[in-house]
Image: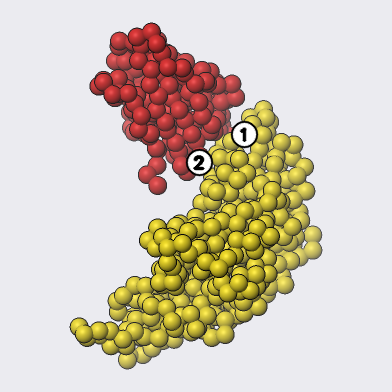
Chain colours: A red, B yellow
C-alpha cells in the first residue's frame, strides 16, 4: 500500500482527476509559432495531442487533449503547468532530468531542479507504468526538435514499437 | 461450499501457489502449469529425449512414441476422426497462419471474401488481412451486438457466393462470449463455405468435439491449457490437409528430395517442417491427461460455480460496467470502472497480489466497438476459488476509495 501511495501521490491523483490545460490550441496569428504532436501508447491505449505556442526561445503556452490513465494524465497536466512560459533551453534541462529520473535508475533525482515534478519519482518502481509517465515528455521532445529547425512538428511518437 | 476441498486440492497441484500468496486471475493470457506437466517434461528431457522420426536406436524410438502419443491425445481431446488430422504448431497464431497460407491463399482471387467477426483476437484478423493484401480478396466482418454476441442474422447475410472461408472464435478472449459455433458452422456450410474455429480460449473451459461442431479447422495453444508455450495444434479435416500444399519447407516433411523435385510426406508430416517442439508436445499431452483426469463435469461445474459467484459481486460494485454480457460466458469478465483507468486498476490490484490483465487484449476492434480504450479482465482457471473472487471484490471496493471514484 505504501508503494502505491508513492506512485499515486495526492498531487498525481489531483491532476489525474482534474487535468489542467486540457484543451485544443487554435492556430496562432500573432507571430508566434503554434505546433502540435501526437503520441500514443499502443499497449494501454493512451492517446495524446500536445500543443505548444512558441515565441522566440520561449514556450508561451502548452495544452493537450487525450485520454489515458491517472499517471499519464497527471504527467501531461503537470508538464503543461510547470513548463508554460519557460525558455526552451531551460525546458530541455528539465526534460532530460525528468526522463533520467524515470529511466536510468542510477542517478538520484534532483528534486530541486524538478520541483513538484519529482512526485513522479515513485513511478520508477512500477516498470510497466514508466511509459505512461514519459509519453507526454517524449512528445515534448519532438516539439523541441521542431523548434530548433524551421519545421513544424507532425510526426507522431509512440512509446512502443509494436 | 461444496467441493471446496477438491478445489483447494487442485490449487495445490500448481507449484506456483506453493510459495506465495497470489490471486491469479489472468489464465486467459496464459495458464499456470501443474506439477504433472512440469514433471513430465523434465522426465522426458532427462531420460527419453532424442530427435524423432530419425534414429533407429531405442531413445529415438521412445521419443518418437512420446511425440506421436501426444498427437493421439490431442486428437482424442478434440474428437478428431484420426490423429493424422492433428498438426503440431507453435500455437493458435501459427495454426491460423498455416491455414491462411496453405488453404486460403491458393483459393483466393481478387474480389473473393473471407468472413470473420468483430470479436476476434488479432491472431484471427491479421493473418487474413495479409492474405487479402496478397490476393486482392476482401475481409468481411460480421458485427456484434451490445451484449457482445455475434449478430447471427448479419453473419448469415455476409456469407455470399464469393466467401471462401469463415473464421471465428469459439470463445472471445476480450468478452468471454461463447459463440454458437455449431450453428455458425452449419450456416457457413449451407453456403458451401469452409470454417476455421479459433479455440484458444475455449479448450480450457469446454469439452470440444470438432466432428460435432463440423468445422473444417480448429486451432488452439498449449499454454492456455495448462501446458507449455511454443506448442499448439491445428486440427484439419483430412481431405483438406491432403489437398493443401505445405507451408514451410525443410526436413521431416518430405518423402524424397532431389533437385528435380521433392515429394512431400502425407499430413501431418507435410506441415511439420524441421525439428518440432518435441518436449512441448509431451508437456501438452501431460496437460491433456491432467484435465481428463479431473474430468469435464468437474471442470465445467467449477468454472460455472466461479462465474455464478463472481457475476453478482461485480455487478454489485457501483460504477463498474461489464463489457460483454453474453448469455453464454466462459471463464472471464471484462470490465471498466467509472473514473479509474484500467491501467490504474491493474496496478492497484497488482499491489494487492491480484494478477489481472488491463489493456486491449489483442482485440482492438472490440475496444473500439464498446468505446473504451482498454478493459480490465479477470479470468479464472482450475486453481481459482471463490475466495479469489471475494479478494478481487474487496480490492475493487478499496480501490474505489483510494481513487475516490
Ligand atoms: C481467442 C484467441 N485466439 C488466439 C490467440 C493467440 O494465441 P497464441 O498467442 O498462443 O498463438 C489468443 C491468445 O491470446 C486468443 O485468446
The answer to whether residue B262 of the structure is visible from this angle is yes
Protein chain holding label 2: A
Residue at 78%, 48% (x, y): give it. B312
Task: State which quadrant residue B342 falls in.
Answer: top right
Q: Residue furthest left?
A: B259
Which residue is more in the foreground, B308 or B141? B141
The answer to whether residue B27 of the structure is visible from this angle is no
Provide the secondary structure element on which disc 1 rests: loop
Q: Residue furthest right?
A: B2
Please indicate whether residue B22 sits to the left or right of residue B246 in the image: right
What residue sits right under mark 2 in the picture?
Answer: A44
Residue at 68%, 65% (x, y): give it. B180
| Quadrant position of the N terminus of chain B in the picture | bottom right
Q: Percent position (x, y) of residue B352?
A: 60, 42
Q: CA distance from mark 2 to mark 1?
A: 13 Å
In the image, residue B240 above or below residue A73: below
Assess mark 2: CB under 8 A from ligand 1? no
Q: Percent position (x, y) of residue A132?
A: 47, 34
Protein chain holding label 1: B
Q: Percent position (x, y) of residue B335?
A: 65, 44
Q: Which label sits on residue B340?
A: 1
Q: Percent position (x, y) of residue A33?
A: 35, 15
Q: Residues within 10 Å of mark 2 (few under 14, many from 20)?
A: many
Residue at 46%, 77% (x, y): give it. B87
Which residue is more in the foreground, B365 or B307? B365
Q: Residues within 10 Å of mark 1 (few under 14, many from 20)?
A: many
Amino acid at each position: 500500500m505504501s508503494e502505491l501511495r508513492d506512485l499515486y501521490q495526492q498531487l498525481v491523483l489531483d491532476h489525474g482527476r482534474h487535468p489542467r490545460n486540457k484543451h485544443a490550441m487554435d492556430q496562432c496569428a500573432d507571430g508566434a509559432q503554434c505546433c502540435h504532436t501526437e503520441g500514443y501508447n499502443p499497449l494501454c491505449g493512451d492517446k495524446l495531442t500536445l500543443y505548444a505556442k512558441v515565441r522566440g526561445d520561449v514556450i508561451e503556452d502548452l495544452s493537450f487533449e487525450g485520454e489515458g490513465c491517472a499517471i499519464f494524465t497527471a504527467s501531461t497536466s503537470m508538464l503543461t503547468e510547470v513548463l508554460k512560459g519557460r525558455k526552451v533551453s531551460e525546458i530541455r534541462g528539465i526534460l532530460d532530468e525528468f526522463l533520467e529520473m524515470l529511466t536510468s535508475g542510477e542517478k538520484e533525482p534532483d528534486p530541486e531542479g524538478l520541483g513538484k515534478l519529482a512526485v513522479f519519482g515513485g513511478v520508477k518502481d512500477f516498470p510497466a507504468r514508466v511509459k505512461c509517465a514519459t509519453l507526454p515528455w517524449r512528445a515534448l521532445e519532438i516539439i523541441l526538435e521542431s523548434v530548433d529547425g524551421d519545421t513544424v512538428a507532425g510526426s507522431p511518437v509512440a512509446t512502443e514499437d509494436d | 461450499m461444496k467441493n471446496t476441498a477438491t478445489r483447494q486440492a487442485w490449487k495445490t497441484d500448481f507449484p506456483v501457489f506453493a510459495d506465495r500468496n497470489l490471486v491469479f486471475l489472468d489464465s486467459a493470457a496464459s495458464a499456470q502449469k501443474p506439477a504433472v506437466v512440469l514433471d513430465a517434461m523434465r522426465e522426458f528431457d532427462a531420460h527419453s529425449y532424442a530427435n524423432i522420426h530419425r534414429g533407429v536406436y531405442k531413445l529415438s524410438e521412445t521419443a518418437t512414441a512420446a511425440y506421436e502419443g501426444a498427437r493421439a491425445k490431442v486428437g482424442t481431446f478434440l474428437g478428431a476422426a484420426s490423429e493424422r488430422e492433428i498438426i503440431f504448431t507453435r500455437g493458435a497464431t501459427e495454426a491460423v497462419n498455416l491455414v491462411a497460407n496453405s488453404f486460403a491463399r491458393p483459393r483466393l482471387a481478387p474480389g473473393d471474401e473471407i468472413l470473420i467477426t468483430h470479436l476476434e483476437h488479432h491472431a484471427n484478423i491479421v493473418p487474413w488481412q495479409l492474405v487479402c493484401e496478397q490476393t486482392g480478396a476482401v475481409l468481411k466482418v460480421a458485427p456484434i451486438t451490445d451484449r457482445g454476441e455475434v449478430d447471427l442474422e448479419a453473419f448469415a447475410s455476409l456469407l455470399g457466393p464469393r466467401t471462401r472461408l469463415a473464421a471465428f472464435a469459439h470463445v472471445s478472449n476480450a468478452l468471454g462470449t461463447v459463440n454458437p459455433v455449431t450453428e455458425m458452422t452449419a450456416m457457413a456450410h449451407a453456403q458451401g463455405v469452409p470454417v476455421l474455429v479459433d479455440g484458444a480460449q475455449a479448450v480450457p473451459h469446454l469439452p470440444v468435439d470438432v466432428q460435432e461442431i463440423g468445422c473444417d479447422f480448429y486451432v488452439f495453444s498449449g499454454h492456455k491449457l495448462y501446458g507449455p508455450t511454443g506448442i499448439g495444434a491445428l486440427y484439419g479435416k483430412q481431405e483438406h490437409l491432403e489437398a493443401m500444399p505445405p507451408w514451410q519447407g525443410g526436413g521431416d516433411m518430405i518423402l524424397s528430395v532431389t533437385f528435380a523435385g521433392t515429394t512431400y510426406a502425407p499430413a501431418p508430416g507435410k506441415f511439420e517442417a524441421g525439428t518440432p517442439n518435441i518436449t512441448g508436445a509431451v508437456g501438452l499431452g501431460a496437460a491433456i491427461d491432467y484435465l481428463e483426469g479431473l474430468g469435464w463435469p468437474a471442470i465445467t461445474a467449477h468454472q460455472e460455480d466461479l462465474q455464478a459467484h463472481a457475476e453478482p459481486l461485480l455487478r454489485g460494485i457501483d460504477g463498474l460496467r461489464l463489457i460483454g454480457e453474453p448469455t453464454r460466458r466462459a471463464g472471464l469478465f471484462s470490465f471498466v470502472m467509472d473514473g479509474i483507468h484500467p491501467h490504474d486498476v491493474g496496478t492497484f490490484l497488482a499491489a494487492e497480489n491480484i494478477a489481472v490483465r488491463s489493456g486491449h487484449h489483442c482485440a482492438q476492434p472490440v475496444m473500439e466497438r464498446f468505446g473504451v480504450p482498454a478493459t480490465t479482465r479477470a479470468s479464472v482457471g482450475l486453481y481459482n476459488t471463490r475466495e479469489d473472487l471475494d479478494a478481487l471484490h474487496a480490492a475493487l471496493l478499496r480501490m474505489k476509495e483510494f481513487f475516490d471514484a
